[in-house]
Amino acid sequence: MRTATGAGTTASRAAVPAGPADRHRPLRRLLSAGLLAVFVGTCLAVGLPTDRLVLLGWVISALAVQSLGRGWVALVRLLADWIPLGALLMLYDLSRGLADGLGVAVHVTEPAAVDRWLGNGVLPTVWLQAHWGASWWAAVAALVYSSHFVVTPMVLGLLWLRDRARWVGYARLVLALSAAGLVTYVVYPAAPPWLAARDGVIEPVHRISGSGWAVLGLPKAGTLLHSGQAQANAVAAVPSLHTAFAVLTCLVLLPVARQRWQRVALVSYAVVMPLVLVWSGEHYVIDTLLGALYTGAVWVLVPRLGRLLRRHREEGPAAAA
């Protein structure tokens, strides 16, 4: 069974396989448990991390622990795989932050007009905030929204351990999707609902993506989220990469999900994320639809481009001969 991530089969192929008599396994388990406890404790104390460098540090630390006792080759492979990937993702973050300072006019009215048309004269965000404000939903929304920052690094880490070929394919999709979003942010900066409302362009809308952390008894987590949001590019709204990566997670993991509840959870995640984004004032409906469309395009085109490049490399020596 072949998937769009480029893996030949769904069988797991560990990046760092253990030998039959692995005397370091207890140590790895102990250190992994300790690292997990520290991560969970940090999240409970200050909230889920949103900084890319911090998240990559956690993931690489966990993978380094799993590489203990497997020889220097495993550590070299870890660094060779993750340092270039991390550098490219950090470059994306830097470029994304600079994209709103290039002098391109910010689009404020057009996304709102499209959503008003989709809502038959009513903005979906305005309607949702007026009719849907239960505390339990705010808590769920905060968790789903913040999961965007940790899910992709976690999936990358798990795939690197279990199936490096699938990891390579997924990493390419992540980079391609990030690049597509960045280009759009540069050429079409757009204001999200909360910003358009602040400027008086649409009806009052509140930015409430982090309000549920107080419901969960973790107000510091909400403060950390707001701090990260304040440093981000406020007009990088089209497409919604929160939606795009939620859909990508679903597409990548569905082929290897063995249990029905796993498949239901993956599909639900891809559906609930855009609902949270629209409700919280972070995105218009059209932003989320475009995010899903971008994922579909990357999912189809990147593997196809990879096959074309491989064919070109294979045919080159044959033509020369």
Image (cartoon, helix red, strand yellow):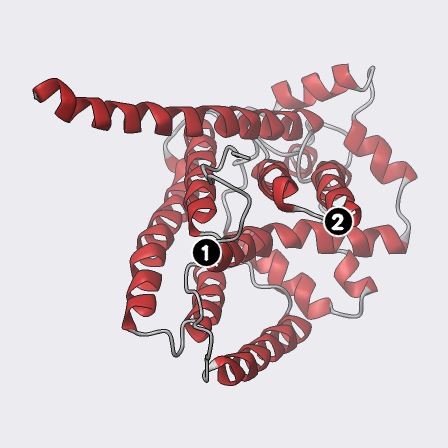
Query: Does 36 appear above or below 243?
Result: below
Q: As rendered, which of 40 and 44 lies closer to the eye?
A: 40
Q: Is residue 293 left or right of residue 142?
A: left
Which numbered disc covers residue 160?
A: 1
Residue 102 found in image quarter: top left
Classify 10 Å Cα crowding around label 2: few (below 14), some (14-19), many (20 and above).
few
Instruction: Give how far across and how far down residue 78 sits, in percent.
Output: 35, 63
Name the secondary structure under disc 2: loop
Residue 260 found in image quarter: top right
* Residue 104 in view (yes/no): yes
Query: Does 207 appear above or below 226?
Result: above
Type of amino acid at the residue the image marks with label 2:
Gln
Q: As rendered, which of 9 and 224 lies closer to the eye?
A: 9
Q: Residue at x 48, y 52 (%)?
A: 163
Q: Residue at x 32, y 58 (%)?
A: 83
Query: Which quadrant is home to the C terminus?
Result: top left
Type of amino acid at the residue the image marks with label 1:
Trp
Which numbered disc covers residue 259?
A: 2
Residue lying farthest to the front in this orientation: 20
Separation (CA) of disc 1 from disc 2: 22 Å
Q: Is residue 37 left or right of residue 177?
A: right
Q: Earlier in the sequence, mark 1 or mark 2?
A: 1
Q: As rendered, which of 48 and 160 lies closer to the eye?
A: 160
Name the secondary structure under disc 1: helix
Q: Mark 1, mark 2: which one is toward the viewer? A: 2
Instruction: Give how far across and how far down residue 248 sits, in percent.
Output: 58, 38
Q: Residue at x 65, y 64 (%)?
A: 223
Query: Does 176 appear above or below 212?
Result: above
Q: Residue at x 24, y 23 (%)?
A: 312
